[in-house]
Amino acid sequence: MNDAPSWTPSPRLRRRRRRNALVRWTVRVVAAAVIFAVGIALGESLDDNPDPAKSPTTTSIRTLGPLPLSNPATVTVTVTRP
């Protein structure tokens, strides 16, 4: 009996599989690059933000008083009935 498979994939099907594999690997590489970039960004943000327990806290309190009001010009209006 013949041990070779009776059906062999067509060249078009082999190209499609190769293309699908290429797309999958491209998606994986892009996903890994995005995860790497997010990790770098997170690490930088944690490094830039100082630990509040180690740094002294400075609180500034300033009370603002009201501004002086200027006197508006006085206008006299006389109403007469005809």
Image: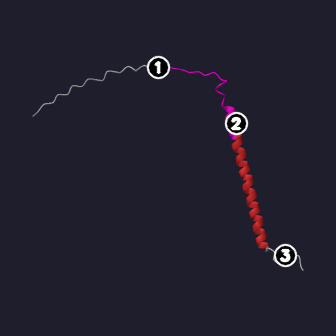
Is there a contact, CB below 8 Å, between mark 2 and mark 1? no
Picture disc at residue 5: 3
Q: Residue at the front extreme?
A: 1
Name the secondary structure under disc 1.
loop
Q: CA distance from mark 3 to mark 1?
A: 90 Å
Q: Is residue 48 left or right of residue 8?
A: left
Check residue 44 in the rendering and tell me which mark sits there, or answer none: 2
Q: Position of residue 67 (x, y in %)?
A: 40, 21
Q: Which is more toward the observer, 63 or 82?
A: 63
Please provide percent x and percent y for residue 45: 67, 36
Front residue of 18 and 68? 18
Instruction: Indicate which disc, 3 or 1, sits on the residue closer to the N terminus.
Output: 3
At mark 2, the secondary structure is: helix
- Residue extent of the magenta highlight: 41-62
Which amino acid lies under the numbered mark 1 shown in the image of this protein?
Thr
Horizontal side of 71 relative to 11 (left or right) equals left
The answer to whether residue 39 is above or below residue 20 is above
What secondary structure do most residues of the magenta stretch adopt? Answer: loop
Residue type marked 2: Glu
Image quadrant occupied by the N terminus: bottom right
Q: Residues within 10 Å of mark 3 (few under 14, many from 20)?
A: few
Q: Secondary structure at mark 3?
A: loop
For label 1, the residue is 63
